[in-house]
């Protein structure tokens, strides 16, 4: 155990020598019992590289002797490196300040992320953490990339922050406020409130938080910390009569552009990116501090570093907390969510059962990802049991060990009340009391976890309990006291072991395909050099016919793809259904948009904020979602109808390809060519057919997946980039700017409906922004575009396999160089190399074959620098 001497201001302090406490050693953990971790990765990589290098070396200088040798060498160079590890991207979501970043730090055993729950900067942007190629698992260095908003995006953010400020400080009675106060609705609004409705304390707090953030935002743009005069000027500007006149926005925009140039000069920014290589953890803390000071300009941060989790394919997206007041930033967050393969929702343990916010966002994750790709982590388990109220919290629980624990607590309470108790026993009593609290806490956590797991796992959601703070304390060698939970009880090792399994299956399959498909392909290619045959007229006719058909097949497949994507992509609604939908939207607006919560200036606020109020009394209302309601059922029916059409499209494309394979095989069978040539040709044809069928399955999977993604995109309203929000944005703008004065609410609502729906008096005349027609066109066009791209990918793969077969059928034949001395030398070298190649291949294939007894492997990590 190491020690150090604390030095005072004048040198070492006598008696200050102390020892470090023991810390949790994550290297003693084991990998999950998974085939990926049972592989000897170092052996496989070294063997594959060595066997390919020997093959390349043996044929060096013979490339020009035979086209088959050229192809073999190219294949060996491509195959010598195993496929890169496929990333499994995990989006980490949750409320602000509830432990998301601490949890990631605990999982990676490093402080890569800021964890101050109260800091706006902590939740101002997305952070990506991924593996740095070639880095050690124990490294303390990282590559950092900072992406900045462009000036157009910064302009949008300035507008957002002006709105957040004026939500709380609108200044003197501006035109907009006067317009809301002069509303002529029959029911009397409460005009004492700025927003025309009574503000609750929660909404008032939200407005204050928004204004505070806006003040910090503008302060950073104008760099007021460096200049008191500028600070006073900004305060004066913010409290002027009207910030909505555009002058302040223009001033901010110009200053932001200049400030961004200043920042770029300090941190070497190029094309909105600033990259820093090999940053130590100490310097990373300084970069994090810099980012906190300039957060309004930062779009995202990427940290590439080493860790055994990252090396095996896991990638974290640490996303800002729920309820972001920046709609542009919310769009970026949701873009990361779309890129993610899974979502991990982090919730405070004590609020899971009662929080409607948690349930809402968990439901959103399940809808987008599916329950099987949603993890629930209940963090802060150590706070679940309140030490002061432990007796009351466990006394009502009847199953053991709680009755026994309650009895022991009662006994100690009686000891505390006994005045004759000797003070000498105080330490022993305190130790015993702490032990009971520890046992009660652990038992209570286990009980609550089982209860929630039983409930959630019925839905297919994996649930974990954790205390990131307890784990981090257990890994801190300078801690002054031990937390109540051990590292294992804190749940981080169990969660980490599960995370190891997430990328394992896909990467095992990639390695397996390389070992059982890519490397054996080199053996087949070598056979084309060693084994040559003489063709007869029938074989020659087969090759000529095949080449001729190949020339027309690609054009035919592209025509099939174009025609079928046009025909098979259906409309989401008929003309009759469109009329019903228009009527239902109008009816919804006339009946739902009369609630007291959204009348008067509340409706204007929604229009100003793209239909989605970000704070105040109106949070939770969503005009886009309201409009989407009458349409969702039709789009869901469309999705159901389109699912079998994805398979139809795949079949239409695959049928001519497989038909060609079948015809060629039948033609070869009818020829009188040498049986050995016939056998080798059929083998090559079968391989090409098998690879094309795999490409067909990939196409079918992608067609179905993109169909669901499109359906979700058009039926989910979560930010201003969603299709319905984009369609409605210009409508809201025009309606919001409608003339004020008496009856403004009804004018705005009427204008909104007239701009998007056919007039009731002129049903055959299109509105300025025909909502249903525009959504229909965008839904269908997007589906056609993504389907065509996957069809094109299949066509490319299929034609490549067919061309490969054509090349093989030619290389199987004796050519002019076959009998030369140089060709004979090349064949001798190749035969000799293949002996070692075949033996090595058999050895590494043995790593993948069949279930075998596996011992759990410890997680190999080199000791860190302190150790």
Image (cartoon, rainbow, N blue to C red):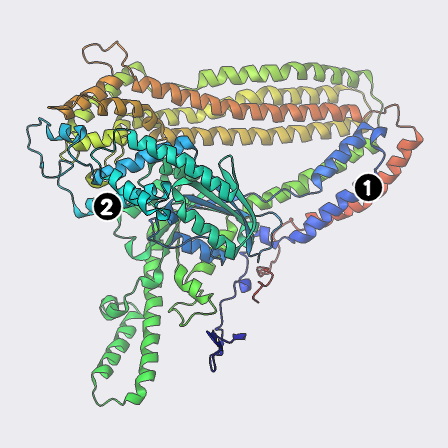
Picture coordinates of residue 39 (x, y %)?
63, 52
Q: Nearer the viewer, residue 614 or 512?
A: 614
Residue 545 seen in this snapshot: yes
Picture coordinates of residue 502 (x, y %)?
50, 48
Neighbours of disc 1 within 10 Å: few (<14), some (14-19), many (20+): few
N-terminal of the pair, mark 2 or mark 1, is 1
**Residue 486, placed above or below residue 371:** below
Q: In which quadrant of the rendered image does the C terminus lie?
A: bottom right
Q: Which mark is residue 208?
A: 2
Contact flag, marks 2 and 1 (Cβ < 8 Å) = no
Name the outermost residue toward the front.
229
Mark 2 lies on a secondary structure that is: helix
Q: Is residue 145 left or right of residue 186?
A: right
Picture coordinates of residue 649 (x, y %)?
50, 22
At x 67%, y 38%, the residue is 517
Q: Which mark is residue 57?
A: 1
Mark 1 lies on a secondary structure that is: helix
Q: Nearer the viewer, residue 400 or 294?
A: 294
**Residue 759, placed above or below residue 521:** above
Q: Is residue 312 left or right of residue 191?
A: right
Q: In which quadrant of the rendered image does the N terminus lie?
A: bottom right
Picture coordinates of residue 411 (x, y %)?
25, 80
């Amino acid at each position: 155990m190491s020690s150090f001497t604390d030095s005072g201001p004048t040198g070492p302090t006598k008696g200050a020598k102390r020892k470090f406490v023991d810390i949790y050693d994550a290297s003693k953990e084991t990998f999950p019992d998974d085939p990926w971790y049972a592989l000897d990765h170092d052996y496989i990589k070294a063997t594959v590289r060595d066997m390919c290098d020997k093959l390349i070396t043996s044929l060096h200088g013979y490339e020009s002797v035979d086209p088959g040798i050229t192809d073999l060498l190219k294949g060996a160079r491509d195959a010598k490196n195993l496929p890169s590890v496929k990333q499994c991207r995990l989006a980490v979501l949750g409320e602000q300040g509830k432990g998301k970043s601490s949890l990631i730090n605990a999982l990676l055993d490093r402080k890569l992320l800021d964890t101050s729950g109260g800091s706006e900067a902590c939740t101002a942007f997305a952070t990506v953490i991924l593996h740095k190629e070639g880095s050690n698992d124990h490294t303390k260095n990282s590559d950092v990339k900072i992406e900045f908003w462009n000036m157009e995006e910064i302009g949008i953010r300035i507008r957002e922050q002006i709105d957040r400020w004026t939500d709380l400080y609108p200044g003197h009675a501006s035109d907009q406020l006067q317009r809301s106060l002069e509303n002529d609705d029959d029911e009397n609004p409460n005009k004492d409130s700025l927003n025309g409705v009574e503000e609750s304390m929660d909404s008032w707090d939200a407005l204050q938080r928004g204004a505070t953030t806006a003040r910090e935002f503008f302060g950073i743009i104008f760099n007021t910390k460096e200049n008191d005069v500028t600070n006073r000027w900004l305060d004066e500007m913010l409290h002027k009569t009207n910030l909505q006149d555009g002058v302040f926005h223009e001033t901010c925009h110009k200053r932001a552009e200049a400030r961004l140039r200043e920042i770029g000069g300090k941190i070497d920014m190029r094309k909105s990116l600033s990259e820093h290589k090999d940053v130590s953890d100490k310097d990373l803390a300084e970069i994090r501090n810099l980012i906190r000071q300039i957060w309004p300009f930062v779009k995202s941060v990427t940290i590439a570093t080493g860790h055994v989790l990252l090396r095996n394919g896991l990638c974290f997206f640490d996303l800002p907390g729920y309820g972001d007041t920046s709609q542009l930033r919310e769009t970026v967050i949701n873009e990361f969510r779309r890129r993610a393969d899974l979502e991990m929702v982090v919730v405070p343990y004590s609020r899971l059962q009662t929080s409607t916010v948690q349930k809402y966002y968990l439901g959103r994750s399940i809808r987008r990802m599916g329950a099987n790709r949603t993890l629930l982590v209940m963090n802060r388990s150590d706070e679940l049991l309140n030490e002061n109220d432990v007796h009351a919290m466990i006394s009502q629980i009847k199953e053991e060990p709680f009755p026994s624990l309650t009895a022991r607590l009662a006994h100690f309470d009686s000891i505390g009340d006994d005045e004759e108790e000797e003070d000498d026993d105080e330490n022993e009593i305190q130790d015993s009391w702490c032990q009971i609290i520890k046992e009660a806490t652990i038992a209570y956590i286990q009980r609550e976890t089982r209860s929630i797991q039983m409930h959630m796992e019925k839905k297919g959601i994996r649930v974990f309990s954790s205390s990131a703070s307890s784990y981090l304390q257990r890994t801190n060698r300078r801690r002054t006291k031990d937390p109540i939970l051990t590292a294992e009880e804190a749940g981080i090792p169990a969660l980490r072991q599960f995370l190891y399994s997430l990328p394992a299956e896909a990467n095992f399959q990639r390695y397996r395909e390389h070992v059982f498909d890519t490397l054996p392909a080199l053996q087949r290619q070598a056979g084309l050099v060693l084994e040559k045959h003489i063709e007869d007229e029938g074989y020659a006719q087969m090759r000529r016919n095949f080449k001729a058909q190949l020339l027309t097949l690609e054009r035919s497949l592209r025509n099939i793809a174009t025609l079928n994507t046009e025909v098979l992509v259906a409309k989401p609604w008929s003309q009759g259904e469109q009329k019903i939908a228009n009527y239902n939207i109008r009816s919804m607006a006339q009946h739902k948009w009369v609630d007291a919560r959204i009348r008067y200036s509340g409706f204007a606020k929604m229009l100003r904020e793209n239909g989605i109020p970000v704070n105040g009394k109106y949070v939770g209302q969503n005009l886009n979602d309201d409009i989407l309601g009458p349409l969702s059922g039709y789009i869901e029916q469309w999705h159901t109808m389109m699912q079998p059409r994805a398979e139809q499209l795949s079949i239409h494309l695959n049928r001519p390809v497989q038909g060609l394979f079948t015809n060629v095989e039948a033609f070869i069978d009818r020829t009188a060519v040498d049986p050995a040539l016939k056998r080798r040709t059929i083998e090559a044809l079968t391989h090409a057919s098998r690879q094309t069928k795999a490409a067909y399955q990939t196409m079918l999977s992608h067609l179905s997946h993109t169909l669901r993604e499109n359906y979700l995109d058009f039926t989910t309203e979560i930010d201003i980039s969603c299709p319905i929000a984009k369609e409605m944005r210009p409508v809201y703008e025009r309606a919001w700017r409608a003339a004020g004065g008496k009856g403004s609410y009804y004018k705005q609502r009427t204008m909104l409906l007239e701009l998007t729906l056919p007039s009731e008096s002129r049903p055959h005349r299109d509105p300025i922004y025909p909502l249903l027609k525009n959504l229909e066109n965008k839904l269908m066009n997007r589906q056609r575009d993504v389907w065509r791209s996957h069809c094109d990918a299949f066509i490319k793969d299929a034609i490549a396999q067919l061309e490969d077969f054509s090349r093989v059928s030619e290389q199987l034949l004796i050519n002019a160089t076959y009998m030369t001395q140089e060709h004979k030398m090349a064949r001798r070298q190749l035969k000799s190399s293949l002996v070692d190649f075949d033996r090595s291949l058999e050895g590494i294939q043995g790593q993948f074959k069949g279930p075998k007894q596996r011992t759990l492997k410890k997680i190999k990590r080199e000791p860190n620098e302190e150790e």
